[in-house]
Image (spheres, rainbow, N blue to C red):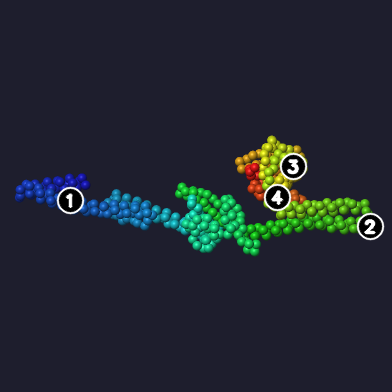
Amino acid sequence: MVALVVLAAAAAAALAVALAQWMPVWMAALCSALACGTLAGLVVWRTFVPLRALIRALTGTVAGYRDGDFSFSISWDRYGDLVELVNAHNELGQALREQRLSLVQRELLLDTMVQNTPVAMLLLDASRRVVLGNLAARRMLGDGRRLEGRALEELLGEAPPAVGEAFARGADGMFTVGDEDHEDIYHLARRMFRLNGRPHELILLRQMTAELRRQEVQTWKKVIRVISHELNNSLAPIASLAHSGAELLRRGQLEKLPVALATIEERTRHLEGFLRDYARFAKLPAPRDEPVHLAGFIEKLRTQVPFGIEGVVPDEVLRFDPAQIEQAMLNLLKNAHESGSPPDGVSVAVRRIADGWRIDVLDRGTGMNEAVLANALLPFYSTKRSGTGLGLALAREIAEAHGGRIALLNRKDGGLCVSMVLPGQT
């Protein structure tokens, strides 16, 4: 532009000098200025009009990018430096288009998965209104209608009472919908997180009926196998000994008859205890909480089975079902004595923890390997030849019925620590 101005001024001066030979100086200067100015204006117009169009195009594409429209591109072939700028701008647009397409495809895939999963999914905002509900949630809570924008309380009011009761508990859990002839079992899971800086809640409702039915069949098969095995192990020798007793009686060899009868009695009592353990596990009632003095409860246990006490038992009053917790503790202490631990190696420790009270049953036996630790709390799992696999399972059932839990851990210097955690209410 500087060169253009200097060139125009020089041309105007030269033209004015030339025209001054035929006309007055002022007229020569005016004519030369008009001529050179017109020529310079044409050059400027030819230069700046396309450049302004390019700037407007760049401004429009940037505004389109801001609005999420990446479909624009610009063509320019006039000036080398601007060609590089336009090419870079077009490459940016192409990259943004490819990223947008990838995101759209991923969102489509995610939406397809969310909408077609059999798990009912609800996303709630801070006001507990539905932000997103998939097809399974619509079928379960909205009769197939859209759920977005509706309040959770409104949906629960239209749902079966069991659904509302499950939500009212405020935690994950299982619930049953329907009657005895046709019932569906669901698992409720709830998770809180922040989205765009605002609290949201994700609710998952998974139908567990078919899966639990399969597990129930497998469990019954296992129960039948265990009971059949135990019955055969007891009935076969009883039948044999009864036959032998009859032969001894027929032959008059009465001196051997008490041994056979004692063995029959021993096998019968074992079978009676086996069936009693199964009945106790199957008919475990809901706990009846009552105030229990913790130190007195532990001392009462020591009158039934020997064990030491590590530390001091806190002088506290807790609320639990003393009969059930006593049964669970006796099972744990019996296992500790049967673990190969010396009698003085079995002890109990009671301590306060953040979420309640922890009662540890400690032994110095052989401990458990990883496979046994992973399965020890499962019903009917036992590593003992004559074990029923119900002692630890019953203790776990009792602890969980009280809102607590059971945990197993190998001790550093050998032995096992079985911890029963009970809630901290007093």
In the image shown, does 23 or 115 lie closer to the viewer? Answer: 115
The reply, left or right, for residue 280 in relation to residue 245 is left
If you read the primary sequence from the N terminus, does the residue marked by circle 2 or circle 4 appear first?
A: 2
For the point 68% across and 49% down, the residue is: 287
Q: Please, is residue 134 above or below residue 325 in the view? A: below
Q: What crowding class fits label 2: few (fewer than 14 Cα within 10 Å), some (14-19), or many (20 or more)? A: few
**Where residue 344 sits: x, y (%)?**
75, 38
At mark 4, the secondary structure is helix
The residue labelled by disc 1 is 40
The residue type indicated by label 3 comes to Leu
Contact flag, marks 3 and 4 (Cβ < 8 Å): no
Q: Distance between the Cα atoms at labels 3 and 4?
A: 18 Å
Task: Select label 2 or label 4 by which is in front.
Answer: 4
Q: Quadrant of the C terminus?
A: top right
Q: Which mark is residue 301?
A: 3
If you read the primary sequence from the N terminus, does the residue marked by circle 3 or circle 4 appear first?
A: 3
Task: Select label 3 or label 4 by which is in front.
Answer: 3
The reply, left or right, for residue 353 in relation to residue 49 is right
Q: Distance between the Cα atoms at labels 1 and 4?
A: 101 Å
Name the image quarter holding residue 67: bottom left
Q: Which mark is residue 281?
A: none
The residue labelled by disc 2 is 251
**Where residue 120 sits: x, y (%)?**
54, 58
Name the image quarter holding residue 306: top right
Q: Which mark is residue 394?
A: 4
The reply, left or right, for residue 412 in relation to residue 205 is right
For the point 79% across and 57% down, the residue is: 232
**Where residue 404 sits: x, y (%)?**
64, 46
In the image shown, does 71 or 381 lie closer to the viewer? Answer: 381
Q: Distance between the Cα atoms at labels 3 and 1?
A: 111 Å
